[in-house]
Image (cartoon, coloured by chain):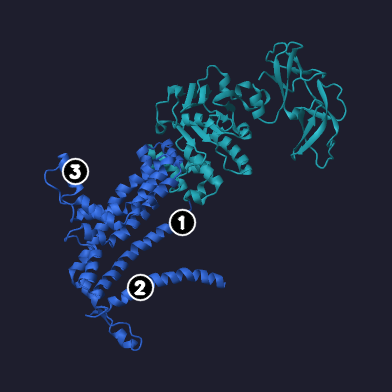
Chain colours: A blue, B cyan
Amino acid sequence: MMRRAVLIAVPYFWLMALFLVPFIIVFKVSLSDTALAIPPYVPTLEWRDFRTFLSQLDFENYIWLTQDDLYWKAYLSSLKIAFLSTLMTLAIGYPVAYAMACCPEKWRSTLMMLVILPFWTSFLIRVYAWMGILSNEGFLNQFLLWAGIISTPLTILNTNTAVYIGIVYTYLPFMILPIYATLDRMDASLLEAAEDLGCSRIGAFWLVTVPLSRNGIIAGCFLVFIPALGEFVIPSLLGGSRTLMIGKVLWEEFFNNRDWPVASAVAVVLLLILIIPIMLFQRNQQNQAEAGR
Amino acid sequence: MPEDVFAPWDDPEEKPLIRFQNVTKSFADSIVIDDVSLDIYEREFLALLGPSGCGKTTMMRMLAGFETPTSGRIELSGKNIVPLPANKRAVNMMFQSYALFPHLTVWDNIAFGLKRSKMPKDKIAARVEEMLKLTRLGKFAGRKPHQISGGQRQRVALARSLAKAPKLLLLDEPLGALDAKLRQETQFELVDIQETTGTTFVIVTHDQEEAMTVASRIAVMDEGKLIQVDTPDRIYESPNSVYVADFIGDVNIIEGRARKQGADLYGIDWADGQRLLAVTSERAFTEGQPCHLAIRPEKITISADKPVHADNAVQGKILDIAYLGNLSTYHVELPGGMIIKAQTANTRRMSPRSFTWEDAVWLSWTVTAGILLAE
């Protein structure tokens, strides 16, 4: 009995220490006011006069978020960018995963390796590399000029296009791997059965392969959508001044404006927005586990 | 009333539904099907029987359209179907793994093929209900494949492959995943369904008992060749080779040389200093030709005393007794060291066994009990 309690307590303690406690701190900061101090907010936690401490907390910052249209525009723009880049990642990732699953057995581990290989380099360095590729004097423009396809360099860097490219590139493996896993498990005789019953190859793909890889598609989409929504490195390095993403806003509030309470409020709202897809994702995973196989 | 016997293969006027004409199939460097010609008739239940790797599955996959023969023709109702893809053939297949679509209900699985043809919706529903009734699956129409038992899944697979009323139904080891008891019941069910629907069935199996139970004809295959195609009783009682005799059921093979003794009566010189074994044979053998005498264990009588009027009798010693419940098999060692199996039916309960280990016994059989084979 005791042993079981201890075993169960360990992961809960872990969650408490690494998620709940920091979240409570962030939430508390979001209810505070800015101040020219270290740390830059009041009130700081005081146990002696806990009642006055509580009375100084308010939801002012949350009201502020609704008053300045910068914030809800940034949320909406982030949702749009995350949603569209998820679709693009799916459009590229599905064919890649499908091709991998169709490959002869001996090639698969090599291909899998190639998908995971970019993780061996720092994410930041890879995003910098994209700056080198996409800039006006970058490799892409030089190549297109050399090939005679364009006569003046394309402006890609510091636009939303660059942000999309960056997000799709970065999160592609998260789309490919779960889809590949479901396709790999699929019984090849199912496709033969579909064909035997009068389906064309394409018909069998839409009626059998796609529905059976549904769980992989859903998992992949969430794995891309959730981090893309709060993404800040990619929009700040590849995006321009007009790229509006909530991660970037949050970063600017925190470091440029040194307004920790508003930054914390932005973070809490972002978390609340993310809870819905995260819960849907969990349910999908659970359904998958229950369906067996 | 010999007219009523179903034997279209004996009627030269009868047109076959399926005709394999000198079909050869090779993969990379190995020949899997070697110049096979075979006619399959309408309403027939043909079993392709052989050990794994004999090419029986390839034969079936060529019929379904998943493999193309390297050379030769395959005709369906007189038309060459080799260039037709699988989805354009009036042939359906029941897969060994059943290959039921896990995301669809039993009802939708059965309707899958019908929906692909341009059948009106109410007709599809009627046909699915008919199939559910035929396979006694009505109660499970709304369930997904993982929510029903193995036996039910097998019936869904059968219903799905029959739904489009194919000219030919292929069954790839259809009962392989069922346990012994269910398997026996299902064998008879399969025969009933075949008879009610009047569909031509081709079944692939490595289980000879299954083939004997369900098939109207059995095609025994080995290494890409058809060894014998015949009715189950002829395969069993008149095998054309030692391979077939040995593959189907239990058999004693006695090697020797043929000595002609009458019109179709031969004596087999099988061991020095022993009396020749008498056997009749429709097949002609030359004097001294090496031959094999195949005798089924149940055709050998075992007795303590020397039988008086037996055509053939040899003496031996009981080495082993295998009690199988309904039968007992005695392994009898002959003086030369050869072991002959003899079988007796245990028709009475609790009767004490007449023989035991090390007993000296006589084995006897009639002149027609065995069959003489060249190879």
What's the CA distance linking mark 1 and mark 3? 48 Å
Identify residue for label 3.
A143
Q: Is residue B94 above or below residue A252?
A: above
x and y, in percent, of residue A273 in the image: 30, 66
x and y, in percent, of residue B33 in the image: 51, 25
- Residue type marked 2: Pro
Q: Return the disc, 2 or 1, that comes first in the chain's sequence.
A: 2
Q: Chain of mark 2?
A: A
Residue drawn at 50 percent across, 33 percent down: B170
What's the CA distance linking mark 3 and mark 2? 48 Å
Q: Callout 3: 10 Å neighbours few (<14), some, many (20+)?
A: few
Q: Is residue B370 left or right of residue A143?
A: right
Identify residue for label 2.
A22
Identify residue for label 1.
A289
- Residue type marked 3: Phe
Q: Is residue B251 visible?
A: yes
x and y, in percent, of residue A38 in the image: 26, 79
> Outermost residue, bottom direction?
A49
Q: Callout 1: 10 Å neighbours few (<14), some, many (20+)?
A: few
Which quadrant is the C terminus of chain B positioned in?
A: top right
Q: Return the disc, 3 or 2, that comes first in the chain's sequence.
A: 2
Q: Is residue A172 above or below residue B355?
A: below
Q: Is residue B204 above or below residue A60?
A: above
Q: Chain of mark 3?
A: A
Q: Is residue B126 visible?
A: no
Q: In the image, which is nearer the foreground, mark 3 or mark 2?
A: 3
Co-location on one chain, circles 1 and 3: yes
**Regarding mark 1 in the picture, which secondary structure is present there?**
helix
Mark 2 in CB contact with mark 1 (< 8 angstroms): no
